[in-house]
Image (cartoon, rainbow, N blue to C red):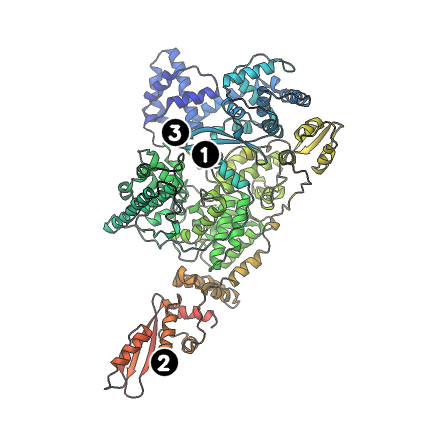
């Protein structure tokens, strides 16, 4: 049900309203299609009933309720992400255009207003005056963002909103939904940061009315002499200033912060900190998947085990005096049930509540924990099969069915927890929000620097299977740069990857329906990417390795692997590294978030002619002017940007990532406003030396200003005015760093050193059966290319992951084993005689406990000459070898013990071929 109070509050922020609460209630009560809507969309026919109802009321009231209807539509579209019929959307766009023209009527006042304020402020600060509330407010509105007045009051009364890790940002709370905080983050201008951190004395309280009184008093005096302005007129004036300063898109984006969710403070700070590559323990995949079976007693028994575990955890919590406990269950130690992992996830959730507490309370009582986790009956009613976890559509359907119409807050928190687990990575929490309420977003991403750390972590990690490392590395790279969902990278086929220009390292990825599934929008799309040289090389090597395979085979994984197996083998290790580098809240899907953010920044920098001038090598390489031009060369088609409609580039980028509307992308993927700072502004700013002296906190007679300006590459345009790079000024004024700031090497070639040697080293140092065998296969130039990958994939299937990852067995000193390897290479069944001694028996047991040899089934045969009884010898051999031999008669000679070998799940020649490849 639509909350009319929310509509009224939102509409009053936009401007004066002419209707009242009764009019809003009337619209909702007389619009059944709106009340019953299950999706965030309305069709043309859905407006018939409300239009008929409006025609039946008197003219004057009809006008007021039509205005209420228009604002409800605005709220649904802009706040709740609804889709309206084209004619209704056009009507709203017309209303926005009327509002734009009303704002532009203030252009004669807005032009020059910022300069007057800046000069007046500098003069007062230079004379030693303390800045007033109005001065600081005007600086924020003129230089940082045209933020709503409610947020401005929050900034002026709460010092904690300033994040003082350079470059300084302003972190403001917009709203709270189900304990989820919607925030906005603005990049502070140098002067705004200086005022808030140095000069300003924060008041304890400040209302919008008090703030407007301060501003009116300030603007009515010298040097402004403006007439009294209402709060709506003042907001229009600020927006008009930004329209003239930047453009309509950037202004509206910064003025409507509710259209996005900023990254939480703790995660944002982590992104700023220096990250080093990490090592991790390569872990086994989850159990092999099988088709989901109907609800049965076995499934109920498994669920009962985890229910008992949950109760045991709560009991132990009471014994611990309700204090936070250490890790009670580790994800890697859980034996995940194949038919239904939901009870296991609930047990894990219980352990996390005990260890970390709730959102507000660090220590939870047992009664609270029971209330938060008592959903076992429902989890049996709606089982989550293990193989469904790797299918984004299936796990989303499970969550929708489980959550349903209940809107249970605690169940929602459980699903949020599931989404942060490797098995629940494909769950989209946004989709669970009721249609008539604003979406709750998971504001997180993997940024470019963290991607670089993740790739380096994979490079330094020891992999028993070097091709697994190659699959993981390529999957990470394409998921980020290609902005791919988890299912899309798994379904990407060999024929979907095209090298467009090798010199530009420009690739095209075709994202479309395959036999394994379809895109989320059910529509095909393509995306162009440019890759750093190392990632470009690895992708080419993988394609070369698979060049002889059918083009509709998946790019990631061995031939014949199911999509769920590929998800477990290659995406699960990536998720573990992501969580190690980016924190437990990060997911594989956040690679897509980071890639989308980079793609939009590249597009905006192309349009605004504003390349990034500082940063780490990897990040700066992505924003290098030539790199950006290469990526969008398909769109430019060798034309100058001035001859193209640059507004369409935003729609083109939105299409490439698989969204129909930019508003969806802005809300769920482009977090905060700090990354937008300066994009639409000139890369250099002109300031007076007096202003710079205040920004650098230098006394009037200091001679240090010239040295600092020289270090920052400032250019003098007069005795008192200089131009300086905007980014360098921002860093210097807030960090105190005044050394020369040379640009990092921004060539994509420099971001990965010696990729060829890394690949060879992975193969050479794998120290496993599989890596040793691969070395021979990949170095054998006589091997037919069309059969090479088929042989490798077949061997991978025969051995399985556990055997492939096992170390190379040592069979030194076992003479009979070496003879067997040499003499019986191509026979279907292997038979040879061995001594019936305890020493050989011990060798026998040791050898066939080795993973690769465990694929063989040995049987013993004792051939003897009758009529002598050899039962005692048979028992002794059974004791030595742990296998009792079968007794067969022979005409003469001494007793002989024979070993017969057969393969358990493949032809024996395949296994012997692999063993021979180990060069024993």
Query: What separation in Å lies between label 1 and label 3 (alpha carbons)?
Result: 15 Å
**Residue drawn at the location 34% of the way across and 80% of the way down:** 836
Q: Is mark 1 on a helix, strand or loop?
A: helix
Residue with the mark numbered 1: 664
Q: Where is residue 24 in the image (x, y as percent from the top left)?
A: 37, 19
**Mark 1 crowdedness (10 Å alpha carbons): few <14, some 14-19, many ≥20:** some
Labelled disc at residue 647: none
Residues at marks 2 and 3, CA–CA distance in whole angstroms = 79 Å
The residue wearing badge 3 is: 437
Camera-side mark, 2 or 3: 2
Residue positioned 39% across, 21% down in the render: 5
Pick the residue in front: 50 or 533. Answer: 533
Q: Nearer the viewer, mark 2 or mark 1?
A: 2
At 41% from the left and 22% from the top, the residue drawn is: 7
Q: How crowded is mark 3: few (under 14 residues within 10 Å), some or many (20 or more)?
A: some
Residue ID for mark 2:
835
Of residues 232 and 545, which is closer to you in this image?
Answer: 232
Q: Where is residue 290 in the image (x, y as percent from the top left)?
A: 32, 53
Q: What secondary structure is found at the residue carrying circle 3?
A: loop
Inspect this view and state whether residue 261 appears: yes
User: Quarter-wise, where is residue 37 in the image?
Assistant: top left
Q: Estimate the spatial distance between the alpha carbons at disc 2 and disc 1, rounded to whole Å.
A: 74 Å
Asked which quadrant contains residue 127, the reply is top right
Instruction: Specify whether 348 is left or right of 243.
Output: left
Mark before the other along the chain sequence, 1 or 3? 3
Residue 811, x across and y down, in percent:
44, 72
Residue at the right extreme of this rendering: 719
Q: In which quarter of the image is the N terminus?
A: top left
Q: In this view, does 346 lie above or below 241?
A: below
């Amino acid at each position: 049900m639509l909350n009319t109070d929310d509509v009224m509050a939102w509409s009053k922020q936009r401007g004066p309203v002419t209707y009242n609460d009764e009019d809003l209630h009337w619209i909702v009560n007389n619009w059944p299609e709106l009340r019953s809507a299950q999706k965030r969309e309305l069709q043309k026919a859905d407006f018939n009933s409300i239009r008929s109802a409006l025609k039946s009321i008197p003219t004057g009231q009809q006008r007021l309720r039509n205005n209420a209807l228009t604002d409800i539509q605005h709220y649904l579209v802009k706040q709740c992400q609804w889709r309206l019929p084209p004619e209704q959307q056009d009507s709203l766009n017309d209303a926005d255009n009327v509002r734009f023209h009303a704002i532009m009527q203030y252009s004669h006042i807005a032009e020059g207003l910022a300069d007057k304020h800046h000069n007046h402020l500098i003069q007062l600060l230079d004379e030693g005056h303390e800045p007033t509330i109005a001065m600081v407010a005007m600086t924020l509105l003129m230089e940082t963002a045209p933020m709503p007045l409610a947020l401005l009051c929050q900034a002026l009364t709460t010092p904690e909103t300033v994040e003082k890790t350079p470059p300084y940002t302003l972190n403001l709370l917009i709203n709270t939904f189900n304990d989820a905080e919607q925030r906005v983050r603005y990049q502070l201008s140098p002067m705004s940061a200086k005022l808030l951190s140095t000069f300003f004395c924060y008041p304890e309280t400040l209302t919008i009315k008090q703030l407007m009184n301060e501003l009116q008093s300030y603007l009515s005096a010298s040097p402004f002499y403006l007439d009294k302005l209402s709060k709506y007129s003042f907001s229009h004036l600020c927006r008009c200033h930004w329209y003239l300063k930047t453009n309509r898109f950037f202004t509206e984006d910064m003025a409507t912060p509710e259209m996005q969710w900023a990254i939480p403070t703790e995660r944002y700070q982590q992104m700023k900190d220096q990250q080093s590559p990490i090592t991790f323990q390569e872990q086994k995949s989850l159990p092999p998947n099988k088709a989901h079976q109907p609800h049965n007693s076995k499934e109920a028994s498994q669920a009962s085990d985890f229910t008992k575990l949950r109760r045991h955890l709560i009991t132990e919590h009471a014994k611990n005096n309700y204090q936070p406990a250490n890790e009670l269950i580790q994800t890697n130690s859980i034996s995940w049930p194949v038919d239904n992992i939901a009870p296991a996830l609930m047990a894990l959730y219980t352990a996390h509540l005990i260890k970390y507490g709730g959102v507000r309370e660090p220590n939870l009582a047992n009664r609270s924990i029971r209330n938060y986790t008592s959903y076992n009956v429902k989890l049996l009613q709606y089982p989550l099969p293990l193989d469904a976890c790797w299918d984004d559509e299936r796990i989303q359907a499970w969550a929708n069915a489980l959550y349903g119409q209940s809107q249970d807050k605690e169940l929602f928190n459980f699903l949020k927890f599931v989404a942060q687990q490797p098995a629940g990575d494909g769950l989209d929490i946004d989709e669970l929000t009721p249609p008539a309420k604003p979406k709750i977003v998971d504001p997180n991403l993997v940024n470019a620097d963290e991607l670089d750390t993740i790739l380096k972590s994979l490079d330094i990690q020891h992999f028993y299977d070097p091709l697994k490392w190659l699959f993981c590395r390529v999957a990470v790279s394409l998921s980020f740069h290609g902005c791919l969902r988890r299912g899309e990278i798994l379904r990407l086929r060999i024929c979907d990857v095209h090298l467009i220009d090798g010199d530009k390292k420009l690739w095209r990825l075709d994202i479309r329906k395959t036999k394994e599934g379809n895109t989320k929008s059910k529509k095909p799309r393509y995306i162009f990417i440019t890759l750093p040289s190392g990632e470009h090389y690895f992708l080419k090597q993988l394609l070369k390795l698979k060049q002889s395979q059918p083009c509709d085979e998946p790019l990631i994984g061995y031939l014949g692997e199911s999509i769920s197996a590929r998800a477990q083998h290659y995406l699960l290790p990536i998720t573990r590294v992501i969580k190690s580098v980016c924190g437990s809240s990060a997911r594989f899907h956040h690679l897509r978030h980071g890639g989308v953010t980079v793609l939009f920044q590249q597009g905006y920098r192309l349009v605004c002619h504003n390349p990034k001038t500082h940063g780490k090598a990897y990040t700066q390489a992505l924003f290098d002017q030539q790199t950006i031009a290469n990526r969008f060369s398909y769109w430019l088609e060798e034309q100058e940007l001035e001859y193209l409609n640059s507004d369409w580039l935003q729609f083109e980028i939105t299409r490439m990532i698989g969204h129909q509307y930019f508003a969806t992308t802005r809300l769920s993927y482009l977090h905060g406003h700090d990354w937008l700072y300066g994009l639409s502004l000139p890369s250099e700013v002109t300031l007076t030396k007096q202003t710079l002296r205040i920004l650098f906190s230098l006394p009037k007679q200091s001679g240090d200003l010239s040295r600092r300006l020289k270090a920052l590459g400032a250019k003098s345009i007069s005795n008192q005015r200089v131009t300086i790079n905007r980014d360098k000024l921002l860093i210097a004024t807030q960090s105190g760093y005044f050394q020369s700031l040379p640009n990092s090497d921004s060539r994509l070639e420099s971001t990965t050193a010696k990729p060829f040697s890394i690949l060879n080293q992975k193969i050479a140092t794998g120290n496993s059966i599989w890596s040793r065998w691969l070395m021979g296969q990949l170095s054998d130039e006589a091997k037919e290319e069309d059969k090479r990958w088929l042989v490798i994939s077949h061997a991978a299937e025969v051995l399985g992951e556990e055997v492939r990852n096992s170390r190379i067995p040592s069979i030194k000193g076992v003479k009979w084993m070496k003879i067997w390897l040499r003499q019986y290479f191509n026979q279907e069944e292997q038979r040879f005689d061995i001594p019936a001694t305890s020493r050989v028996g011990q060798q026998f047991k040791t050898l066939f406990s080795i993973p690769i040899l465990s694929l063989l089934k040995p049987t013993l045969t004792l051939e003897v000459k009758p009529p002598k009884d050899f039962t005692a010898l048979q028992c002794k051999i059974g004791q030595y070898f742990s296998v009792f031999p079968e007794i067969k008669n022979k005409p003469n000679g001494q007793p002989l013990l024979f070993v017969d070998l057969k393969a358990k799940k493949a032809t024996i020649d395949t296994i012997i071929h692999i063993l021979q490849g180990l060069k024993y």
